[in-house]
Image (cartoon, helix red, strand yellow):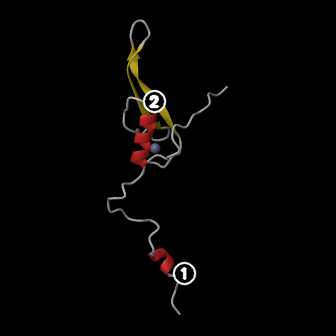
Amino acid sequence: MTKPFVIASKVPCLHCGSPYNFLVCHGGARLDGSPVNLAYQISCKKCRASGPVTKTAPEAVKGWEHRAEPRFDELLPDPLSDFEFEEGEATG
Ligand SMILES: [Zn+2]
């Protein structure tokens, strides 16, 4: 029997591109069993890269996804820049 693997976010890993990531829960428990200082984080299953540590699971997913997407206000090389299509639209 294998444990079902739950992918925490659809956004692939920023480092290795692996779509397999999972939610990690950090934290401890008091002697009575009540959780204390819980923190969440998304980790890549393949390369172990991880997103920011947050207080809630949805925030951890958000943090991971934000990291995975480039900021559009920065100048980044565009893999689908127009020049690739110029040849197909040759004049004449
Ligand atoms: Zn990775």
Ligand 1 under 8 Å from disc 2 Cβ: no
- Which residue is the extreme one toward the bottom? 92
Q: Amino acid at mark 1?
A: Gly
Which residue is identified by label 1?
88
Instruction: Report the residue at 43% width, 41% height from top.
Output: 62
Residue 71 badge: none
Q: Quadrant of the N terminus?
A: top right
Q: Is 45 rendered above or below residue 67?
A: above
Compared with 42, 81 (above or below) is below
Q: Nearer the viewer, residue 73 or 24?
A: 73
Disc 2 is placed on an element classified as strand
Q: Residues within 10 Å of mark 2 (few under 14, many from 20)?
A: some
Give x and y (percent) for residue 12: 49, 47
90 shown above or below 45: below
> Residue 69: where, in percent of width, then height?
42, 51
Please tell me which residue is depicted at 38% across the width and 10% down the height of the picture.
30
Residue type at mark 2: give it: Val
92 or 57, which is in the foreground? 57
Residue at 62% of width from left, 27% of height from top?
Answer: 3
Residue that badge 2 annotates:
24
Residue in front for this viewpoint, 4 or 69: 69
First in sequence, mark 1 or 2: give its number.
2
Q: Residue at x 36, y 54 (%)?
A: 71
